[in-house]
Amino acid sequence: MSTVQIINFTPVSDILPIQRRDFPLADPTLANPLNAVALVDGEWMTLNSSYQAIRASDVTSTSAYASLRCFPLFAERGRYDVQAMSLHKTPLLYRGDYEFDTRIFALASTQGGAAISTILQPLTVGTFTIGSRNYVGLIGHDGTSTNLKPIVGYVTKLPTTNGGQLRFISGWRS
Amino acid sequence: MSAVPARVLNELFTQKLGSSEGKEKMAEYGGSYIRDRLREVAYSRKILPPEQVTRSDCQRSVNHDTLVKIVDVEPQSRALTISFRGQPTANFIRGPKAEIGFFTISSQIFQKTEQELLAYEMPITKIIEENSVKDIQEVEDREFTVNIEAAVQALQAQANGGGSGHALDASSLQAGTVVEFSVRKGELARNATTNDATIRPIQRPDLVNLFKLLDGNRLRSERLLMTEVDWDDILQWTVEDFGDRLQSETAVDGFKYNTLMGRAYIRTVKTDILRAGNVYVFTKPEFFGKFYVLNNTKFYIDKIANVITFQAWEDIGMAIINIASVRKLELYSADANPATNAESLLTDFIPVTEDSLGTPNNQVDQGLTFPYIVQY
């Protein structure tokens, strides 16, 4: 199991080519670091019909998973700049390819089709518990054509050889 | 105009704005285009004058790399009568403290190829650069307006029993089910027979009653904020409001004094941010809040191959610390409490979305110029 720390999502590749776009939070209370389900860096978000950021899957249900295109959150829990703006805009890695290390993953979860176990295994997004609360992050995907859960990236380094973090590259298949 | 401005532009941007001579030449050609709208400096800066702060004035976080400035708020104290033998109650001193977070307001990232700049005789990049500063200040005003509205609504909700408060519209006022504490309806709005978004003209008693909302709470109303639209209604005041000298002056020159009923006033054309029908009154800034500038507007320009890219941004922090130091007058009869939104007309009264700022007035691209000339 992963452990969530202060910094949970760090770039391995150059971030300049990535489009880092700020979107208003549909639920501004998620910017409050004291919220029981406050957003942490490395969680995955999607957009609602109002062009606002929402979690990619229901954070209250550990059987929930993403069904739409989703984007990782590039902002630590409770950042002052996010809280200070009236719209509580938060930055997502919106377009472009990247490689990141993340702590927001569930190695053993099979709700995406398969547990995370091999290099270059596809990844999808779902809700899981780390410690005492739920997060929306990376889970394994079995890669089969019949599995319609979106693929958001591929494993490049397993946590066992990466200091407990999952290294992945972005990539998309709906 | 000849092709000179385009040549000046090309020179300017190839040299990355390195020449003051280039800038002067740009200014020379700057007036030859049709403007879409008036752009004005931020009204928020006139109400809360910005203070420059540096990194050393701010506090860091151990959890992330952003900054706040902690502001002290006046501690409470009082005196009391006591007998010759008695002693006063104790006050273990504590002053509240508020945190003001910093964030960035940026222009868009503007891009254009060097070759396509040749198609313009106006200094398009220079115009955008200059407008960017005002665009940034528009967003400052939007943030400010959202914050002052949140402040008056928070106090209004408290006065009406907490929670989301009560709808404040003409019918609830006439039924006596709501208290006006930090938000007040104008005289014509409160007596309306329907709850609607129609902006009623501002009356002289409306302003007096607005001032009383602040003046009755050991604060003093000092600055008024209103739109030009509402200001125009003041010009309709009669001889009974103005007296004959002012009435004749106003008929010729408009109202030319710096104060209205003893209060400084700020008028704005930004009716997409401060919507017509909303008038705010403020105390002096020292009772009200803070506006800090961490980094003044910076301008970045680069040219990679033939693509010119430029962007402007600033880093600011802004907060209403004492929510009791702002009050609001509503000149429409419908409810503008975002928590109740009784008539579902809220979008008529609050700032437009950030994405909607800068919607053009002109419709040249739609072919709406008269006469419409077609080239072939």
Image (cartoon, coloured by chain):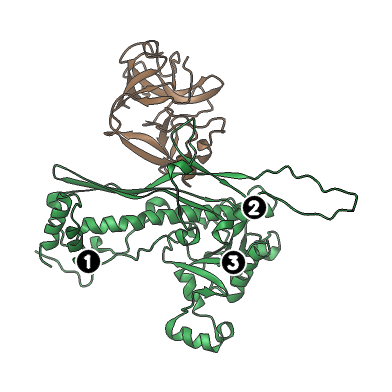
Chain colours: A brown, B green
The secondary structure type at the circle numbered 3 is loop
Question: Label 3 marks which chain's residue?
Answer: B
Please, what is the three-letter code of the amino acid marked with disc 2?
Ala
- Does residue A168 sit above or below A28 in this rendering? above
Residue topped by disc 3: B194
Dot 3: within a 10 Å radius of its alpha carbon, few (fewer than 14), some, or many (20 or more) residues?
some
The secondary structure type at the circle numbered 1 is loop
For the residue pair B231 and A25, the one nearer the viewer reads as: B231
The N terminus of chain B - image quarter: bottom left
Picture coordinates of residue B76, whole percent (x, y):
69, 50
| A146 relative to A110 in the view: left or right | left
Residue topped by disc 2: B157
Residue B368 in sight from this viewpoint? yes
Residue topped by disc 1: B33
| B124 relative to B313 in the view: left or right | left
Query: Mark 2 near mark 3, Cβ–Cβ under 8 Å?
Result: no
Dot 2: within a 10 Å radius of its alpha carbon, few (fewer than 14), some, or many (20 or more) residues?
many
Residue at point 10% right, 66% down?
B2
Question: Label 2 marks which chain's residue?
Answer: B
Please, what is the three-letter code of the amino acid marked with disc 3?
Thr
Please, what is the three-letter code of the amino acid marked with disc 1?
Tyr
Mark found first going from the N terminus, 2 or 3: 2
